[in-house]
Image (cartoon, rainbow, N blue to C red):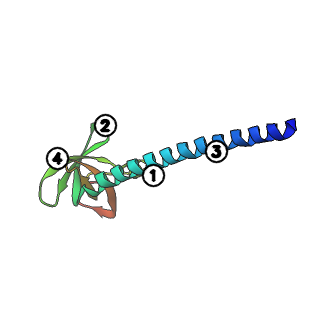
């Protein structure tokens, strides 16, 4: 008789634990979807254009002249740094401009083998 009562107690305790676990899982899932949406929205607003690297600045920054002759300061994207892709003056690059500040950008791609002017 005592064993059946104990089994019921244990099974109820396990059910409560599962419910709490599933509730936490749902909360985390909702939070991650929210952050992914906000990240996606920020990258969709970026303006992409092409340009040529004019000079290399300190701290890993580059002076880039866009096709419309404007000059901006840009930093390389994380994937370029991770894969150790060199960016030198004269390289043609694709740049994402911030919608908030059009004088700053991120270099997202370097065109291969198309150097103009530089070494």
User: What's the CA distance linking mark 2 and mark 3?
Assistant: 50 Å
* Quadrant position of residue 43: bottom left
- Is residue 105 found left or right of 27 in the rendered image? left
Residue 40 in percent (x, y) is at 34, 54
Question: Under tag 3, what secondary structure?
Answer: helix
Badge 2 local density, few (<14 within 10 Å), some, or many (20+)? few
Q: Secondary structure at mark 1?
A: loop
Q: Secondary structure at mark 2?
A: helix
Contact, mark 3 vs mark 4 (Cβ under 8 Å): no
Badge 4: residue crowd in 10 Å (few <14, some 14–19, many ≥20): some
Seen from the viewer's position, the closer of residues 7 and 107 is 7
Depth check: give the residue in front, 75 or 58: 75
The residue carrying pointer 3 sits among few (fewer than 14), some (14 to 19) or many (20 or more) residues within 10 Å by Cα, namely: few
Most foreground residue, 63 or 20:
20
Find residue 97 and report its horizontal and vertical position in percent: 22, 52
Identify the residue position indicated by label 4 in the image.
Answer: 103
Residue located beneath label 2 in the image: 59
Q: Which mark is residue 35?
A: none
Task: Tell me which numbered mark, 2 or 1, is placed earlier along the sequence.
Answer: 2
């Amino acid at each position: 008789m005592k064993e059946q009562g104990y089994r019921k107690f244990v099974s109820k305790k396990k059910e409560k634990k599962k419910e709490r676990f599933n509730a936490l899982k749902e909360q985390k899932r909702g939070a991650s979807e929210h952050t992914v949406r906000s990240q996606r929205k920020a990258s969709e607003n970026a303006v992409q254009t092409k340009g040529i690297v004019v000079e290399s600045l300190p701290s890993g920054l580059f002076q880039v002249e866009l096709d419309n002759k404007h000059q901006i300061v840009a930093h390389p994207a994380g994937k370029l740094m991770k894969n150790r892709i060199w960016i030198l003056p004269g390289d043609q690059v694709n740049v994402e401009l911030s919608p908030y500040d059009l004088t700053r950008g991120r270099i997202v791609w370097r065109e291969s083998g198309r150097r103009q002017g530089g070494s």
